[in-house]
Amino acid sequence: ALFRKTGDAPWVGFALTPLGFGALARGDYPRAMSLLEEALALAREAQDTREIGIALQLMGEVELAQEHYAPASSLLEESLLLVREAKDKVDVASTLRLLGIVARCQGDWERATALLQESLELSREVNITEFEAESLCELGIIAGLQENADEASTLLRSALSKFDTTEQFGISRCLENLAAIAAKMGQWPRAATLYASAATLRDRIGSPLRPYEMADHDRLVRAVQAALGEAAFEEQWRASVTMTIEETVGLALREDPALSPQRREVVSLPPRSL
């Protein structure tokens, strides 16, 4: 409000961008887009290439969250051109990761993997562990979709080990996808524990699942609930939500017995949504 009163347009834009990101994290997509569109207009007015790129990147993430893949890809590609021009490797890594998620959601796993690998390499180059972990998590998700449980578990646990315990959004995504592997391998109590712990973290930080994540997540949670039975599932869930984040991460990082050479069969689950 102060910057609006003083007419300091660039500072208004700087303030609007994190506000837009906060609305995105809370799942308030109309509010996020409104804030980011204003931030973009001010950045264009100031001819600030980097801020234009960041606003476009976040707008692309808002579209991605709503499963609007074509506009998400367009915004992110435009952002990528600008952040590459600004030689900002941090924003390049972040934009590549988001483009990788778009490609994964569209079923182009080969392109998604290439984008995420480039994001991973840049994240390591600029030594941002959180970005490295995020890219590893996304690569693990793709491996899981390709029914490669060993590789998926290794990548996801590697990602989880790199997140600081304060980075609860990233941790929750790793837990959810390790839970998905456990569900597919018939490790029902483990899956319930990891799903419950992830849900607890999301509630704590006020960050709901994105629409593009919901269908498969809900399908697998229902499968776990059906396999355990209502009473056992609820008991397992209640016990899990009382675990500390350190306890949950420790459990998730331990070797999954479902991935031992003696047991690699995948249980029959309801079909994945398209």
Image (cartoon, rainbow, N blue to C red):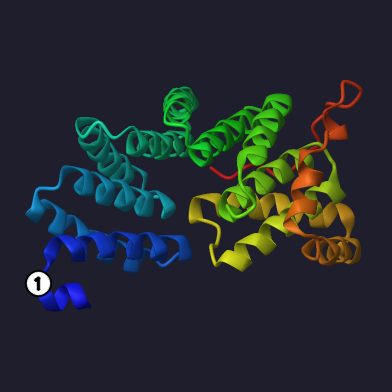
Indicate the quadrant where residue 196 lies: bottom right
* Residue occupying image coordinates x 61% and y 44%: 163
* Residue occupying image coordinates x 47% and y 37%: 128
Considering the image in quadrants, where does the N terminus appear? bottom left
* Residue occupying image coordinates x 65% and y 36%: 156
Q: Type of residue at label 1?
A: Gly
Instruction: Give the side of residue 267 with respect to residue 2, left or right.
Output: right
Residue 177 on image: x %, y %: 66, 43
Front in this rendered view, residue 167 or 32 = 167
Front in this rendered view, residue 261 or 147 = 261
Above/below status of 157 relative to 28? above
Residue 92 on image: x %, y %: 33, 34
Residue 148 on image: x %, y %: 69, 25
Q: Residues within 10 Å of mark 1 (few under 14, many from 20)?
A: few
Above/below status of 157 relative to 232? above
Residue 173 on image: x %, y %: 61, 48
Front in this rendered view, residue 61 or 44 = 44
* Residue occupying image coordinates x 83% and y 35%: 256
Instruction: Give the side of residue 94 with respect to residue 265, left or right.
Output: left
Q: Which residue is mark 1?
A: 7
